[in-house]
Image (cartoon, helix red, strand yellow):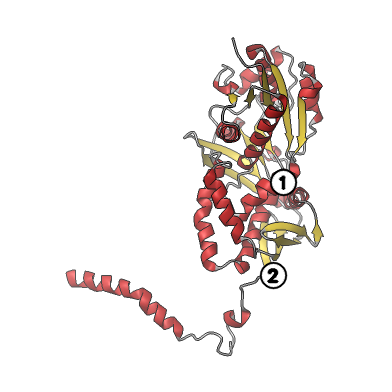
Amino acid sequence: MSTIKKVVLAYSGGLDTSVILKWLQDTYQCEVVTFTADLGQGEELEPARAKALQFGIKPANIFIDDLREEFVRDFVFPMFRANTVYEGEYLLGTSIARPLIAKRLIEIANLTGADAIAHGATGKGNDQVRFELGAYALKPGVKVIAPWREWDLLSREKLLAYAEQHGIPVEMKHKQGGSPYSMDANLLHISYEGRHLEDPAAEAEEEMWRWTVAPERAPDAAEYLDLEFVRGDLAAINGEKMPPHELLAKLNELGGKHGIGRLDLVENRYVGMKSRGCYETPGGTILLKAHRAIESITLDREVAHLKDDLMPRYASLIYNGYWWAPERKALQTLIDHTQQNVNGSVRMKLYKGSAMVVGRDSRTDSLFDSSIATFEDDAGAYDQKDAGGFIKLNALRLRIAANLQNRKA
């Protein structure tokens, strides 16, 4: 007999977690607390409350928390200070949300006196790792229930059949029938997996995309944005200052209108398999390019190169669930130190699926000196004869090696 009396479930109200809610009640015979995070997914969350009540969850045990501000301020923005990209393309929209959800799960477990937490991540995926590493880092002795590693409902069709058998309402069935896409949404992105995307040769259906128009159907006129940065974080759009989550939402709206931010990716999962997913990250795509642009005139060359060297490691730490690990925190301290002078504005041009940098300006912290960089007369600011010396010094080892090879030939 299970010793678990109360469990906090990360609950979206979708197919997987609705089935899990009922399964926990039947299998563990325990009290269930539901936690639904508003991360800006753009969906009405009250239906999750209604579903929880339908299955006997006490009103006091239903948590629906608005975490949008914390999500962008304390997770998305710190990640973008590092220009974080996984495997050259993925902006980690799902990965970066998991440590915040894990943090809140543990807080609610402590608040309600729960014995365990539960999540709906599959045994094939990365999220199980992210949730659980985060939970153990924040509450070492917590019990974690991962139904996908225990039950035999190992397909979407079996989940749908279980839902029908137990009267669990299911939305988002594909209009042509069959299982819905496996989707995840928050203020940074929306992701799609499953269905015919499991064939890496198949093009995604146009009707699948929710946030972005097809680039060929985007407006025929370009739109210009002025993005202002303060210490590496976006602070204003076209002169209008807003809270971080509103800034990102505004970039999503503008980028989506111009068909920016679609990605079709086959990634290498933590568990060893390759997985194909499609992503929409309109605001993040614009933000990444703009942030690199302001850094290009405010960061020292070697500091910028050091950040580029460290970024893949930082990205892997987030992707693999180590947000709360000491090495990620150490890297974050270094990254944040580099951002003290990353202040200024960047002009972006949005057009037909592209976000182009067309200007950058930092009146307080620019390292760009036009009197030195000019192709015109620099009045002696730079002595071009100096170049000959360092070229000869750097070529010396190459000449020595070439002479040796010539003697051996």
Q: Amino acid at mark 2?
A: Asp
- Which residue is nearer to you in this view: 396 or 336? 336
In space, the residues marked 2 and 1 are separated at their CA atoms by 29 Å
Quadrant in which the N terminus is drawn: top right
Secondary element type, mark 1: loop
- Which residue is nearer to you in this view: 18 or 405? 18
Residue 115 appears anywhere in the view: yes
Q: Mark 2 = which residue?
A: 361
Residue 15's x, y, as percent? 69, 24
* Quadrant in the rendering for residue 288: bottom right
Up/down of 177 relative to 224, above or below: above
* Quadrant in the rendering for residue 97: top right
Up/down of 392 relative to 27, above or below: below
Up/down of 206 relative to 246, above or below: above
| Outermost residue to the bottom | 379
Look at discs 2 and 1 and give the one toward the viewer: 2
User: How many marks do you count on the picture?
Assistant: 2
Residue 26's x, y, as percent? 66, 12
N-terminal of the two: label 2 or label 1?
A: 1
Q: Mark 1 = which residue?
A: 212
Quadrant in which the C terminus is drawn: bottom left
Q: Are marks 2 and 1 in contact (CB under 8 Å)?
A: no
Secondary element type, mark 2: strand
Q: Amino acid at mark 1?
A: Thr
- Which residue is nearer to you in this view: 34 or 21? 34
* Quadrant in the rendering for residue 363: bottom right
Residue 371's x, y, as percent? 61, 83
